[in-house]
């Protein structure tokens, strides 16, 4: 599904729904590249301009950007032992998955034989 940033879009919601490597287009009448970068930075998203000659440029055109990274929040999980596990993640769902990985890797969760 193509994503469009326009003046009529709730910008905060728009950037919240983006994932790494997503590509979106914008109207050159509504935004200049510097404006898009500024709005992205306000929403803790780093972008890359789509360069001429790439397949993405041929598909999306000049007014397109690719999400390079999204700033992560720190989530803290308190164990019954008092230990606090800190997880960096984009959202709560990803934090839960990373926590499970951590618990398995550090033998907090093991397979019963």
Image: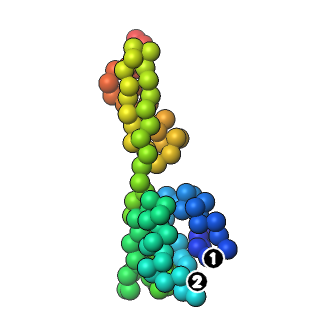
Is residue 33 or residue 65 the one in the foreground? 33
User: 87 left or right of 27?
Assistant: left
Please identify the residue farthest to the right as the structure is shown.
Answer: 8
The residue lying at 40 percent from left, 77 percent from top is 49
Q: Quadrant of residue 80?
A: top left
The residue lying at 37 percent from left, 82 percent from top is 51
The residue at which mark 2 appears reads as: 30
Which quadrant of the figure contains the N terminus? bottom right
Q: Tell me where residue 97 appears, x and y as whole percent.
A: 47, 37
| Badge 1 density bin: few <14, some 14–19, many ≥20, Cα 10 Å | few
Q: Quadrant of residue 69?
A: bottom left
The residue at which mark 1 appears reads as: 7
Q: Decide: is 109 above or below 2.
A: above
Please identify the residue farthest to the left as the structure is shown.
Answer: 106
The residue lying at 32 percent from left, 24 percent from top is 106
Check whether the beta carbons of the residues at disc 1 and disc 2 lie within 8 A of each other: yes
Which quadrant of the figure contains the C terminus? top left
Q: CA distance from mark 1 to mark 2?
A: 6 Å
| Badge 2 density bin: few <14, some 14–19, many ≥20, Cα 10 Å | few
> Helix, strand, or loop for circle 2?
loop
Is residue 106 or residue 90 the one in the foreground? 90
Q: Decide: is 62 above or below 79.
A: below
Q: Tell me where residue 26 appears, x and y as whole percent.
A: 55, 79
- Could one spot residue 106 in this view of the protein? yes
Disc ID at residue 39: none
Is residue 100 or residue 39 the one in the foreground? 39
Label located before the other in sequence (1 or 2): 1
Q: Decide: is 86 above or below 60.
A: above
- Could one spot residue 110 in this view of the protein? no
Q: Tell me where residue 81 appears, x and y as whole percent.
A: 39, 14
> Helix, strand, or loop for circle 1?
loop
């Amino acid at each position: 599904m193509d994503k469009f940033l326009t003046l009529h879009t709730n910008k905060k919601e728009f950037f919240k729904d983006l994932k790494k490597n997503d590509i979106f287009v914008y109207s050159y009448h509504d935004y200049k590249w510097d404006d898009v970068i500024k709005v992205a930075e306000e929403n803790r998203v780093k972008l890359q301009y789509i360069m001429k000659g790439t397949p993405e440029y041929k598909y999306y055109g000049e007014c397109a950007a690719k999400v390079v990274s999204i700033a992560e929040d720190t989530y803290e999980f308190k164990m019954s032992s008092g230990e606090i596990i800190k997880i960096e993640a984009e959202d709560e769902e990803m934090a839960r998955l990373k926590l499970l990985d951590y618990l398995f890797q550090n033998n907090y969760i093991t397979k019963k034989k």
